[in-house]
Image: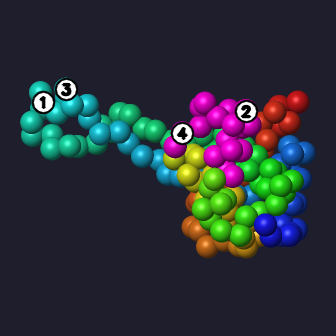
Amino acid sequence: MSSRIKSDVVKALDDWNAGKPVRSIELGHTHRMTHSEEYMQSNPNARNSVDLSKRLSNDQERAHAYVFHLIELFKLNGVPQDHETFLGACDDFDLTFPDAEHLTEEEKIAGRSLAWKALLVGWARAIDGHREARYIEVSRPQVAAT
């Protein structure tokens, strides 16, 4: 286990816990569903086209709640030295995430990725280098609503 979490990660976690906005990046990506098998059979010329009427996107509040849940638990329990151990600990920590049953696989993967990077290099470096349009502000929903 490594000994310290960078101060900007602790600050981001403290701001999140206090319901203050935290600058982050949009996790995952918006994607569109392909047409159903039934549609493809009745429209053979469609060739696995994308159904533009159905748009899926990730719940940024839930995904970031997961990121900060992981960071909080690694702050308490220490940060593993290797990624495989980190992922195993995440599997255990998932059991205590309040909204685990609604977390999509993409949200989980993106959340783990951001948490791991932040724990390794700090919050600012973990979110650095993206197009300005990818940056968002997130707040802990339960605190922000009160």
Q: Secondary structure at mark 2?
A: loop
Task: Say which of marks 4 and 1 sits in front.
Answer: 4
Query: Observer-nearest residue: 90 or 61?
Result: 90
Looking at marks 4 and 1 on the same chain, the residue that comes earlier in the sequence is marked by 1
Is residue 86 positioned above or below 38 on the image?
below
| 84 lies left or right of 13 | left
Magenta stretch: includes residue 90: yes
> On the rendered image, what quadrant is the N terminus found in?
bottom right
Residue placed under numbered mark 1 in the picture: 41
In this orientation, does residue 70 appear?
yes
Marks 4 and 1, how far apart at CA: 29 Å
- Picture residue at 15% right of the left edge, 44% below the top: 47
Crowding at mark 3 (Cα within 10 Å: few <14, some 14-19, many 20+)? few
Residue placed under numbered mark 2 in the picture: 98
Crowding at mark 2 (Cα within 10 Å: few <14, some 14-19, many 20+)? few
User: In the rendering, which numbered label is found on residue 104?
Assistant: 4
Q: State yes or no: discs 1 and 3 in contact (Cβ < 8 Å).
A: yes
Q: State yes or no: discs 4 and 2 in contact (Cβ < 8 Å).
A: no
Marks 4 and 3, how far apart at CA: 25 Å
Query: Observer-nearest residue: 94 or 43?
Result: 94
Range drawn in magenta: 89-105
Q: State which quadrant residue 66 falls in.
A: top right
In this orientation, does residue 21 appear?
no
